[in-house]
Amino acid sequence: MPIKNAIILLHGYGGDGKDISMLTLNWKRFLPNTIFLCPDGHEECKINPAGFQWFDLTKDDPSYILEESKKAENKLQKYIEEVKTEYNLNNSQICLSGFSQGCMMSINLGLTSNQNYNCIVGFSGKIINQDDLSMRKSSSTKMLLIHGDQDAVVSPTFLLEAKDFLIRNNIEIETKMIKNCEHHIPIEASSAALNYIKNNFQI
């Protein structure tokens, strides 16, 4: 079966590729010719050594967090290039998706590449640093951001702040706030994401 599209799914802080891959179990039935890739973060998580992180959160220092996230960005950019070569894909055939810290990485990757990705689907995340991103922005990948209104880990106000930033930067943005939802991905969020990806992959 020829591979026409790829979805790269990035897990949250302390998670791993295996736990975020659960999302794909339902998606696979509706997305033929699509490969699902769920890499592990490049660092062991300091708080949960059984899991991984894209960047360290043990220091509450925005400039440190930004620098660490940029290191992760560079590693992920190399990974994406390898995927493109291996499966003979362009950015326009790739959806970047992620949960929490993985969502934050997806947004940065999708707006600092040399060409737009097909789309971004982010769950329960935020923009790490708006000033930095507005200076580095080189592409305008469209995105769907989904958040739980009861999220106590990443406040839902970050969804509204991201939406405001993206509108100001002329990026096509859709948002969905899920009622009575904490910091996780319920069926309603997974279904909304699947429909968005299907439409953008034109399946």
Image (cartoon, rainbow, N blue to C red):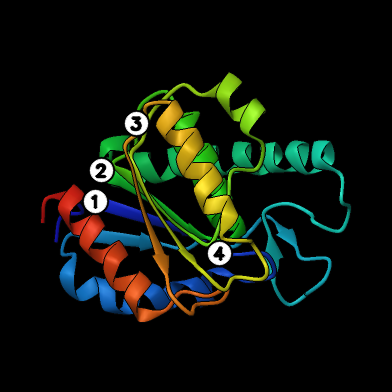
* Residue at numbered disc 3: 116
Q: CA distance from mark 1 to mark 4?
A: 20 Å
Q: Which mark is residue 5?
A: 1
Residue 40, by quadrant, is bottom right
Of residues 63 and 49, the one nearer the viewer is: 63
Residue 96 position, x and y percent, is 40, 49
Check the image and report above or below for 127 versus 176: above
Q: Amino acid at mark 2?
A: Gln
Task: Name the element at disc 1.
Answer: strand
* Residue at numbered disc 4: 11
Q: Earlier in the sequence, mark 1 or mark 4?
A: 1
Q: Contact (CB < 8 A) between labels 2 and 1?
A: yes
Of residues 22 and 177, the one nearer the viewer is: 177
Q: Residue at x 36, y 45 (%)?
A: 143
* Residue at numbered disc 2: 93
Q: In screen coordinates, is 14 left or right of 108?
A: right
Check the image and report above or below for 165 versus 31: above
Please tell me how crowded label 2 is: few (under 14), some (14-19), or many (20+) other residues with Cα within 10 Å: many
Q: Amino acid at mark 3?
A: Asn
Q: Contact (CB < 8 A) between labels 2 and 3?
A: no
Q: CA distance from mark 1 to mark 3?
A: 14 Å
Q: Residue at x 49, y 71 (%)?
A: 20
